[in-house]
């Protein structure tokens, strides 16, 4: 193939000024590294083609499990010289990048022997020896599929062995085919991809990428025991380590890929990610997983200083080990247990709403109110839909509440039925919890809690229902909010 990176490097070396020439070469290599793994931070050193000192240090701020990786540029293709370099420095975990591809010609028997010896030493020293053209081939492959994209990033982070351009193209294509095959439970191409991951990546990258591939395999309905690897993760689900890696890659926009992973994703994996910022990748994940992750409770807070302006859109993140949704001047946290929310202060909880205000919220959200508890501060009374035609939201006059508790009566709690579960929305503090051991999807809980506990604007409600949790059943459907 015609290499734009080689052309750029050759042009750079023709510069009269040595310093300018070196900087331009480093510019070209930096560009191809970032194209191969957009999440990498490329830190330049003051050295160039130095025996002992690296030209770059690669870092991954979004990947705490990944150590910094030194990169050594080399202007020679002579395998005997490159072997000497490996002997002179502690090359473990390093990357050597040859600036020029070897001319396409027949090698002598001695040259073939030297290349074989180089490949063996590179592998035993846990080093990656590659070429600028190989990196460029991986960068080009990123545009074809999610599998190739993940492989390209993993090579930059933890590639091992001698990787020439033809191999880079072949491996990326095989891994791409393996991911497609895993989604269809096709064993042979999946096994070929696993073999490449195990032979060309270090332990961390191989483990993470195989776990992702296994999650795609299981999402197709195949048994984890049939996954073609000698090192099975018997949990049969995506690990927090692998999910964190995926989110850090940053440019995965394949909706079908996220939907596949979301099929077996569990809330505890998301909660074990540590703090996750409101990245675009996490929004893609939650768009697929919001209707699948099961939660028991939610807490809503309004008007904290650290919240975004009221006109900002909703964004998912992980904070304090809890899934959270922030935007439009409110923030809500979601947990698998009610006790998980006890750490959240409730000093800024707004005053309890009146009956008419609650009724308006229920009507706008399309909810059928099953129960309602009112208070005047000293007394409490509960009302059931059984005495009001099946839906308290449709009661034309709440005078009976004022008659019983006085004109200052407010609503302390309401109950609705969602996805076959009762959800109790409490206004002091602003929380929503399912009864007993029941759980509902995070998306359904978000719509229920935010609609009942806050006065959402119409634009916020539309965004919530159409963009944040589009897979949630709409009111009126068989499993929509209803009273039995």
Image (cartoon, helix red, strand yellow):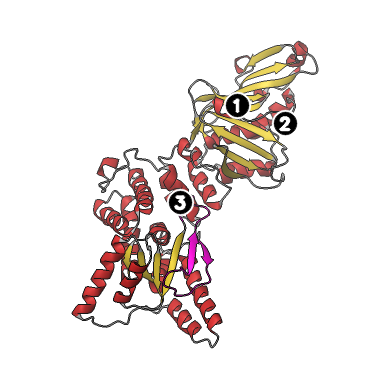
Residue hosting label 2? 348
Residue indicated by mark 3 = 246
- How far separated are the C-alphas under marks 2 and 3? 36 Å
Report the front residue among 120 and 31. 120
Residue closer to the observer: 395 or 458 = 458
Q: Earlier in the sequence, mark 2 or mark 3?
A: 3
Please state the horizontal and vertical placement of residue 341, each as a whole percent of the image.
Answer: 59, 29
Viewer-side label of 2, 1: 1
- Say which residue label 1 marks: 342
Residue 465 position in % (x across, y down) = 59, 41
Dot 3: within a 10 Å radius of its alpha carbon, few (fewer than 14), some, or many (20 or more) residues? many
Mark 2 near mark 1, Cβ–Cβ under 8 Å?
Answer: no
Say if residue 335 shows up in the picture.
yes
Disc 1, SS? loop
Q: Which mark is residue 123?
A: none
Residue at the outermost front position: 88
Q: Is 1 rendered above or below residue 439? A: below
Q: Residue at x 72, y 28 (%)?
A: 347
What is the crowding at mark 1: few (fewer than 14 residues within 10 Å), some, or many (at least 20)?
few
Which of pointers 2 and 1 lies earlier in the amino acid sequence?
1
Prevalent SS, magenta region: loop
- Span shown in magenta: 41-67
């Amino acid at each position: 193939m015609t290499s734009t990176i080689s052309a750029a490097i050759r042009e750079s070396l023709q510069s009269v000024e040595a310093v300018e020439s070196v900087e331009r070469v480093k510019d070209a290599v930096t560009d191809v590294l970032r194209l191969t793994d957009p999440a990498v931070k490329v830190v330049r050193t003051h050295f160039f083609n130095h025996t002992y000192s690296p030209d770059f240090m690669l870092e991954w701020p979004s990947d705490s499990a990944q150590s910094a990786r030194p990169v050594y540029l080399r202007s020679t293709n002579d395998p005997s010289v490159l072997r000497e370099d490996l002997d002179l420095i502690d090359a473990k975990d390093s990357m050597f990048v040859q600036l020029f591809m070897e001319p396409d010609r027949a090698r002598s028997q001695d040259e073939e022997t030297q290349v074989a010896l180089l490949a063996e030493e590179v592998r035993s020293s846990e080093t990656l020896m590659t070429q600028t053209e190989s990196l460029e081939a991986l960068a080009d492959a990123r545009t074809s599929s999610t599998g190739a994209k993940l492989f390209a990033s993993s090579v930059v982070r933890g590639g091992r062995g001698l990787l020439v351009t033809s191999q880079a193209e072949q491996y990326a294509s095989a891994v791409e085919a393996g991911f497609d095959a895993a989604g269809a439970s096709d064993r042979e191409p999946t096994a070929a991809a696993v073999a490449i991951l195990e032979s060309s990546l270090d332990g961390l990258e191989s483990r993470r990428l195989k776990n992702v591939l296994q999650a795609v395999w299981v999402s197709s309905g195949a048994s984890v025991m049939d996954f073609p690897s000698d090192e099975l993760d018997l949990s049969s689900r995506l690990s927090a380590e692998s999910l964190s890696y995926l989110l850090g890659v940053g440019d995965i926009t394949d909706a079908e890929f996220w939907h596949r992973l979301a099929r077996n994703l569990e809330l505890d994996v998301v909660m074990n990610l540590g703090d996750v910022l409101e990245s675009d990748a996490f929004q893609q994940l939650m768009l697929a997983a919001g209707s699948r992750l099961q939660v028991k409770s939610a807490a809503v807070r309004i008007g904290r200083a650290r919240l975004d302006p009221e006109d900002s859109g909703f964004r998912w993140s992980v904070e304090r080990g809890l899934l959270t949704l922030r935007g439009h001047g409110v923030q809500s946290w979601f947990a698998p247990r009610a006790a998980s929310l006890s750490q959240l202060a409730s000093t800024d909880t707004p005053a309890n709403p009146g009956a008419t205000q609650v009724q308006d919220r229920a009507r706008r959200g399309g909810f059928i109110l099953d129960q309602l508890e009112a208070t005047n501060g000293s007394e409490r009374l509960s009302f059931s839909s059984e005495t009001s035609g099946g839906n308290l939201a449709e009661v034309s006059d709440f005078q009976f509440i004022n008659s019983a508790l006085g004109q200052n009566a407010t609503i302390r709690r309401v109950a609705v039925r969602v996805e076959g579960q009762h959800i109790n929305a409490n206004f002091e503090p602003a929380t929503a919890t399912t009864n007993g051991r029941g759980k509902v999807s995070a998306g359904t809980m978000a719509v229920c809690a935010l609609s009942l506990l806050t006065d959402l604007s119409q634009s916020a409600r539309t965004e919530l229902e159409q963009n944040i949790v589009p897979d949630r059943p709409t009111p009126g459907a068989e499993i929509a909010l209803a009273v039995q």
